Image: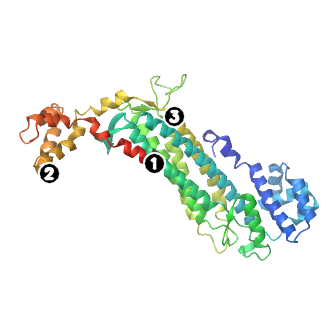
Amino acid sequence: MISRYSRPDAVALWAPETKYKIWFEIEAHAATKMAELGVIPTEAADAIWAKGEHAAWDSDRIDEIERTTKHDVIAFLTHVSETVGEEARFLHQGMTSSDVLDTSFAVQLARSADLLVAGVDRVLAALETRAKEHKFTPCVGRSHGIHAEPVTFGLKLAGYHAEFQRARRRLLTAREEIATCAISGAVGTFANVDPAVEEYVAEKMGLSLEPVSTQVIPRDRHAAFFAALGVVASSVERLAVEIRHLQRTEVLEAEEPFDPGQKGSSAMPHKRNPILTENLTGLARLVRSAVVPAMENVALWHERDISHSSVERGIGPDATVHLDFALHRLAMVVERLVVYPDNMMKNLNLLGGLVHSQRVLLALTQAGVSREDGYAAVQRNAMKVWRGEGNFLDFLKADPDVVVPDAELEALFDLGYHTKHVDTVFRRVFAE
């Protein structure tokens, strides 16, 4: 992961000391249950906890041992034995490395998901506040980047709020699916470790049971987890791109906060660039880059291989830490977003009322004109406005094919017509 784009809480979940603490807890909980089952002495299990629970595992020492063993779990167990003493020989009875690695990875991903949900909650809170603030602030809606019909800025933000509600549900589902425990021994048969040990460790670590682990937890779970992160990242990017477009000089309907002392360009002192949302676009790409490798990890050989291992050592911390950072950066941007209602109104009127063309077309059909003839009449006058020849309403009034009285035509240009159902949408989004 890159420290520039990370928050301490997210990074701490992937720190070596956190990992080794989880490894020890898995091993020690397993030992406790094995002692209860009579597999190992109770005194040994007690000693393991007494000597190891508050130990500071030395990652440098573990790395030193691994340079000889070429095996990280064995290196860890060797280091534990240096701290715990002879009782450490009762650790890992009937277990295999994947029991520790996969269960630990599940814990880290589940805890990361908790942070991501908290990040989404902050985004949701910011969107709700700003949406309600601008519930009836009129602005132009665009399709294909071209002026379409009037909307409100609050309605625009409400749409993103609904999307991040879905993001939250996706993360909760992903967390539930990934949070499984496997303590089943070599090739997953429980031949040398009682299933009761797995049940006990799962309960203690806050995990559910993996029905069939085959020695490793099936990687379809991980693929679904990282796919969910990729979708959430895409939602981050969609809002970021919208803000970037709105900040364009020719548009300037909203922009990122620009702090005192901030510089936009090393060459041009006047610049105020959308650097935060551009950064979010890049971070979304990084998070999505984990999805395909996670999918490719599903097809492991037979009961297990370790082709997934090197991939997950990278994408686990990278994707979760970057998405955590992106969510909080996005929330901050929304919280402090500078909105320009006057510019929104100016842009809304930029085409002299062309945004009301559909209402004119519908009025003509109601007046008995065929849709084809009505469309042709409205479009013919609209194209004159596109060419800068005059005012849309004036052209319509002067066109004999537009058989709608002038007063009724003028009423068709009322912005309020387009906001009459905003309350309905807000009730749906915010459950008001």
Hey, which residue is sitting farthest front in the picture? 432
Left or right: residue 432 compared with residue 395: right
Tell me which numbered mark, 3 or 2, is placed earlier along the sequence.
Answer: 3
Please tell me which of labels 3 and 1 falls first in the chain. Answer: 1
Mark 1–mark 2 contact, CB under 8 Å?
no
Residue topped by disc 1: 162
- Amino acid type at mark 1: Ala
Secondary structure type for disc 1? helix
Residue at point 49% right, 48% down? 164
Q: Nearer the viewer, mark 3 or mark 1?
A: 1
Q: Which mark is residue 283?
A: none
Q: Is residue 393 above or below residue 71?
A: above
- Residue 355 lies left or right of residue 119; in this view the side is left
The three-letter code of the residue at mark 2 reads Arg
Q: Which residue is mark 2?
A: 371
Residue 103: x, y in percent? 71, 61
Give the labeled residue for mark 3: 335
Residue drawn at 17 percent across, 31 percent down? 391
Apparent side of residue 110 relative to residue 242 in the rendered image (left or right): right
Q: Earlier in the sequence, mark 1 or mark 2?
A: 1
At 81% across and 71% down in the image, what residue appears? 94
